[in-house]
Every structure is written in C-alpha cells, then in structure tokens.
Image (cartoon, coloured by chain):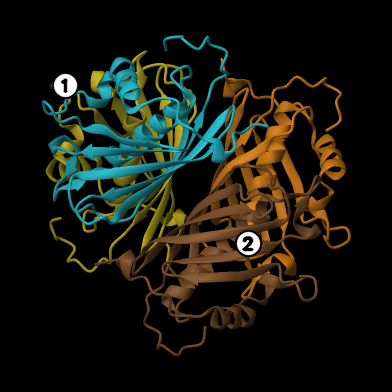
Chain colours: A orange, B yellow, C cyan, D brown
C-alpha cells in the first residue's frame, strides 16, 4: 500500500516541536519579521491538517494594500510543509514538486489564515489542498493544491536534517 | 464587485430542471448508458455546491477494474458544470478554461461520488473544487480544481441555449 | 542524481514496439475506432519527445463539432504515457498523478495533433508538457502539463507488464 | 472572436518602455536589489514572448544555495506579466488568476533565465507558459503555466495606470 488511510492521520509533532524545527532549519521563514511579530506562525495542528497565520507587512504588500502573489504562494507552501512534517516527523525532507494556485479575491487586509488539509500521505508523495482566508471578512482569497516528494525514510529516527 | 459573496450563493435551479436542461442540451453525457442506469446522475444541489454520482461500466474501466483518468476528468467537469449552472441559471454557457486534477488512489469500485464546491462565482470567471470519493470505502480517489469562463449575461432570461 | 540529463534522452522503443505494447496492454485505447482508422496513432518518437494524432469521430464531439474536454484530456494523457514509455522501456508502469490542462480555442476540426516534450525524467517522477494543435489551421487548441509516478525499476528487463 | 491569432502577436512596447512602466508602477519588484544589479531584468521581447533574468541574492536562497520556491514563482509571474503587457500595452492591468508551477531540479546557481511564451491572448484571458533555466548548466529548473484576467479595455489609450 502506497498510502496511509486518512482516517488514521494522527500528528506526531506538537506546535512547539514544529516551531523549534523551523527556527533551526528554516530561519529565513521569519527573517525580517518585525520584533515580536513573526510573519508566519502556526495556529493549530489537527488530524491530517495544519493552519497558519500570515501577518503581512510592507514587504508583502502591493500598492493598494493587496498581499502579493509570491507571499500567498509562500503561505500555501509553508503551511503544506508544516502539515506534512507534523504527520511524518522531522526525519524526512519533503520537497515541493508541484503547486497550483487560484487567486480568487483581493484580500481585505494583510492578515491571512491558511488551512491545509492532507488529501494523500503516501510513501513517496503527499498531496494537499490549502484554503487561504482574509481574517477581516472571512472570505477565501486564494486556494492551492500541491504535491510533495517524500524521500525514502531510511534515515535513523534521530537524524538531524 | 466582480464576485458574489459565497454566503449568498443560493441555487436557482432544481435537480429536475437541471436534468431536463442536460438531457436537452448535452444528450451525449449519458449516451451509451445501460437502460435505466444513467452513467452520471445528480445527487444533490446545495448552497454553492452540487454532487453527482458516476456508475462506471466496462467503457470506463481499465484492466483491474480501475476507473480511467478521462472518466474521472469527465466526472469532475460535469459536476462543476452542473454546480455553476445551478447557481447562474440556464441563460449562460460556461466554458472550461482550466482543469487541474490530482489522482490519489485506485478506486475500490466503479461507483464514484463527486462533490463540487464553488470557491468563486464572479461575473466573468467561476472557480470550483471537486472531491471524488469511492462509495465502496469512502476514500478520496481524486481531487480537482477548475476555472470556467462565463460569457456576458446579456441574453434575455428565457433564452434557450 | 534523481534525473537524467535531458540532452541524453534517447528513445529505447520504436513506434512499432510501442504500438504492439499498447495493443496488448491497453486495447481500450482504440476500442470502438472505425475500421482501419485508429482514434489514436503515434506519429513520431524523438529525443525526449513523442507526437500522436487524434482522429475524433462522433463519440468525441460536442454539438457544433467541438472535440470534448475528456477527449483532449485523454489525448494529452496517452501522448505523455507513450513519450515516457518510449524512453524508459516497457519494464515499468507509469501512473498519472497530476494533469493540468488549459483549453485555449475551439478546435476547427476533429483531427488534433499532440506533441509531448519530457521536461524531467527522474527515477521516481516524470514531468512533461503537451501542446495540442488543430491540423486544420495549426492553432494550439489546448496545452497540458502532467506528472507521472514511476515505480521502482526492480523488475527484470524482460518482465511482461 | 475572443482571441488574437498567435501568428499576429507583435509587441507594442519596447524594453525601455516596459522598464519605465515597471519602475513607476511596481517599484517593489526590484526593491532591495544590490546597487546597480537589479534582481529582475528584461532580456528580450519577441513576437508573443518575453524573457527575463533573475539575479538571486541571499534573500532568495535556501540553505545549500537553492533558489526558493516563492522566488521562482515571482520570476514566472513577473515574466508573464511583462510578456502580456508588451503585447497589449500599458492601458490595461492584467491580474493573475491561476499559476501552476512544476519544480524540476535544484538550480546549480542563483542566476535563472525565464522565457515566457504566450499561448493565447484573448479579450478577457491570456494563457502563457514559462520555462526557467539555470544559466550555469542550461538545465530547466522549473516550468509554469498561468492565466491572467484582462479587464475590459475601455480606458483611453493614453490612460496612466
């Protein structure tokens, strides 16, 4: 079987463990954030899901206060990465192979919440969908689906990536 | 505003009206179906959504009993078309401009249910997502997102397309 | 290295070998074709590429003579499958994991040529793009990109799939 | 006809005019670039095409020197925007509605060239594909297709957007 039944998708990492892993391995995610206000923060980890919040500042905005496309792409990609990591643990490095994003509406503000749902978590591939909502009015501003390649899990469980 | 708030997405056509419209305008959808068992049938219409059932027969199966990719593509496309039609009425002809489909698992049987959710219904574009589940075990077998172009609604409301 | 340099992409199967493989393993591809006129036929195999012709008949047409979306999807999928098979040989069974298709124009006729170009041929994934042109006027009618999962090549080279 | 024949796709803006337009309307594109070395620069404008160069610096790199996904997304999006603008002129504001990107290989260096080809330039929608190549070895590192919505061209031809 090249997949895990979605009904059995229990997370194996806590928010605190994920935060520590990301700070150590991907410090650039929140590089340049205003002091005390990380650009990307984990809101919740659930069975087969993860949600994150983007606090956009001037670096992420287009004229008129619209959050830029690359910023929404990054939000989708990071939320998906966190969701997968939360369910396979820090022993493997997932790589984005495909991301398809639909831009639906101009966000009403710079605070966007992303909810990622794992559609498939196989041995080699994970497929996810991500909904992005403006917190100002709850409207969906963008939607993405993405595929991640998962390397063979031959590393010892305490390997440091 | 180039969009309808999703909280206001009320269907304007019933299942019966949609069935009559499709039989008249797209008889090929169920052409070749076994007598009394349409290949594609509408299960439900909801606020911003529609669901359909595929009863695959030998024409749609690959060796081993797997439903073929083009058949799942057609299921996604038809369900999306019905969902949009149900909410804009039979006065306009939506055209598929983009469809992105992820194949997740081999279906356990030939009966697949599709649920389409409208993500955006604008004046010119509609964006939807479609989940396809095998009825045998409830597992998602494929997931798609699609964009439809909606022509200018200048036709009189009782025009026959 | 999880990839083959594209400059070294030499085909390992001829058109005749591919035709025999498809007739034996996928007879449904041309099932129902008019006598002596296969719906799908291979035009050419090149370094990192393959091209096929679709001869659409009434089964594939929408009112007005337009080739249906599922038919164009199938053309893209089959051409990609043939291109990959031509370069990895008949020892492995590639499976479509993602296909993204853009519909550009209504085809002027029912004869469509598809050209598939391999963008990446890795150990585990192949990524391709497919251009589909109406032979009547040479205009591109649809364009697709697709990803295929390639199973571990542990089978003996003369295995029959 | 909702499209321009691709054989007639002549650019209507020069590189200099495009550079001035982008500096005035999208100064954030090259904000933060090292002095005298813009991150994104236009290489060429052709019939139905445009090419741009990315000079990635530390802001765009992941550990190991890999150009980040959001940076490649931005490169694809900007190149597509420039290609469309070059062919419809500065009178209309195209908006990205969909972008699908496949990541193929880790780039060998931080200099990436993108070539955008317009597949369709209609009244309401433009569809493009973008190939991204590492200049170090000429290998394709990513490939994208994208759709842009073009607003009604009712503005006077000398309108300033």
Q: Which residue is mark 2?
A: A136
Q: Residue at x 16, y 21 (%)?
A: B34
Q: Is residue D48 visible?
A: yes
Quadrant occupied by the C terminus of chain A:
top right
| Image coordinates for residue B109, horizontal then vertical, percent | 37, 17
Q: Residue at x 80, y 71 (%)?
A: D34
Q: Give the structural element (helix, strand or loop) at label 2.
A: loop
Q: Which residue is mark 1?
A: B34
Residue A70 is marked as none
* B90 and D44: which is toward the camera: D44
Instruction: Quadrant for residue B93, please give it.
Output: bottom left
| Image coordinates for residue C139, horizontal then vertical, percent | 28, 56
Report how far apart the C-alphas of labels 2 and 1 lie in the structure: 51 Å
| Image coordinates for residue A55, horizontal then vertical, percent | 73, 59
* A67 and C27: which is toward the camera: C27
The crowding category of the residue bearing disc 2, from other C-alpha atoms within 10 Å (few below 14, some 14 to 19, many at least 20), is: few
Instruction: Quadrant for residue C79, please give it.
Output: top left
């Amino acid at each position: 079987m090249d997949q895990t039944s979605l009904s059995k998708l229990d997370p194996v990492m806590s928010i605190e463990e994920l935060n520590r892993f990301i700070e150590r391995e991907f410090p650039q995610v929140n590089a340049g954030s205003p002091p005390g206000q990380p650009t990307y923060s984990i809101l919740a980890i659930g069975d087969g899901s993860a949600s994150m919040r983007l606090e956009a500042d001037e670096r992420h905005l287009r004229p008129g206060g619209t959050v830029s496309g690359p910023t929404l792409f990054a939000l989708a990609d990071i939320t998906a990465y966190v969701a997968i990591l939360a369910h396979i643990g820090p022993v493997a490095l997932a790589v984005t192979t495909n991301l398809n994003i639909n831009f639906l509406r101009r966000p009403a503000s710079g605070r966007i919440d992303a909810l990622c749902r794992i559609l498939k978590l196989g041995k080699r591939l994970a497929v996810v969908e991500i909904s992005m909502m403006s917190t100002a009015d709850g409207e969906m501003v963008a939607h993405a689906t993405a595929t991640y390649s998962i390397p063979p899990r031959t590393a010892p469980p305490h390997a440091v990536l």
